[in-house]
Amino acid sequence: MPIVTTKEMFKKAYEGGYAVGAFNVNNMEIIQGITEGAKMENAPVILQVSAGARKYAKHVYLMKMIEAAVADTDLPIAVHLDHGPDFETCKSCIDGGFSSVMIDGSHFSFEENIALTKKVVEYAHDHGVVVEAELGRLAGVEDDVKVSAEDSSYTQPDEVEEFVTRTGCDSLAIAIGTSHGAYKFKGEAKLRFDILEEVGRRLPGFPIVLHGASSVIPEYVDMINQFGGTMPGAQGVPEDMLRKAASMAVCKINIDSDLRLAFTALVRKHFVEHPDHFDPRQYLTDARTGIREMVRHKIVDVLGCNGKA
């Protein structure tokens, strides 16, 4: 099976009341862990590459490893640029084999966001690639994306119809209270399901995306703290809230911090339990297994896309 776009994935997800997981990748073990977990649950999957991941691993290496994962699993796998900062980055990814790109113009004015998104959409659609856009700004930190709480803003439902119509984008990331990173909230998380419901009413059948949707799984935070780390106060989005979002208009849920936590927790645990080990294959096997099992949990218990490949 070749790399696919998200178009058919999202159509099925919207009609079926579930979401597809979009997992950020940086190296071979993360790619293997994600796709092995998806294969075990027979789930479609989106592998996301940030601008930072492209700098770290190089575009060509990531693409060849993803192509190997497609051949190995025969799953429907989409390759998506996460938070494309400009037209040039989106164009490079489109030309380099990505099947989906996100252009993040959320820090611009409404009109500037439309103009930039439309430019990317026109180029992408000419090359058979789909485009995710963003309206509203999430707080938090993810690679080069840094937004303070003061600069964050909820998506305004009365803007979404005009934005989607004028840009021609294929999916829309909205801000309803999630945020990037492992330190999301002080106190209880509060997602604005009223905004999500109104956006869904104004854009019937249109796929909505949630960024910053890691749950910061306590098991991995506790493991990191137990084996020498210090992550007091790390807190994410409760998984019951994500399940509710997946049953509404949300068709894509982004997960990055939980991958990093699982990977790091298992490496820390390995070195404490086996201080004499120095073979990367030993500790990276544990990390890969941690990624796989975390992804399986997300697919079955949060996204509901198991059996939907």
Image (cartoon, grey):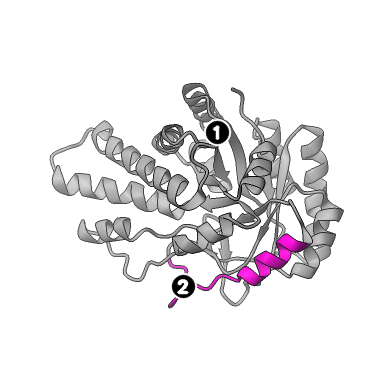
Q: Residue at x 47, y 23 (%)?
A: 72
- Residue 126 is situated, as x and y percent measured from the top left of the image, at 82, 34
**Left or right, 118 with reference to 302:** right
**What residue is disc 1 on?**
309
Q: Which mark is residue 87?
A: none
Q: Which residues are magenta?
A: 183-201
Between 305 and 278, the residue placed more toward the observer is 305
Q: Residue at x 43, y 51 (%)?
A: 301
**Left or right, 193 with reference to 218:** right
Which amino acid does the dot numbered 1 rest on? Ala
Vertical side of 64 occupied by 102: above or below: below
Which amino acid does the dot numbered 2 rest on? Phe
Instruction: Look at the image and say whether residue 186 sits in the magenta stretch.
Output: yes
- Residue 306 is situated, as x and y percent measured from the top left of the image, at 49, 40
Between 49 and 57, the residue placed more toward the observer is 49
Q: Earlier in the sequence, mark 1 or mark 2?
A: 2
> To which quarter of the image does residue 220 belong?
bottom left
Q: Residue at x 63, y 73 (%)?
A: 151
Report crowding for label 1: few under 14, some 14 to 19, many 20 or more residues within 10 A (C-alpha): some
The quadrant of the rendering that contains the N terminus is top right
Report crowding for label 2: few under 14, some 14 to 19, many 20 or more residues within 10 A (C-alpha): some
The quadrant of the rendering that contains the C terminus is top right
Q: Number of numbered discs present?
A: 2
Between 58 and 191, the residue placed more toward the observer is 191
- Residue 190 is situated, as x and y percent measured from the top left of the image, at 52, 73
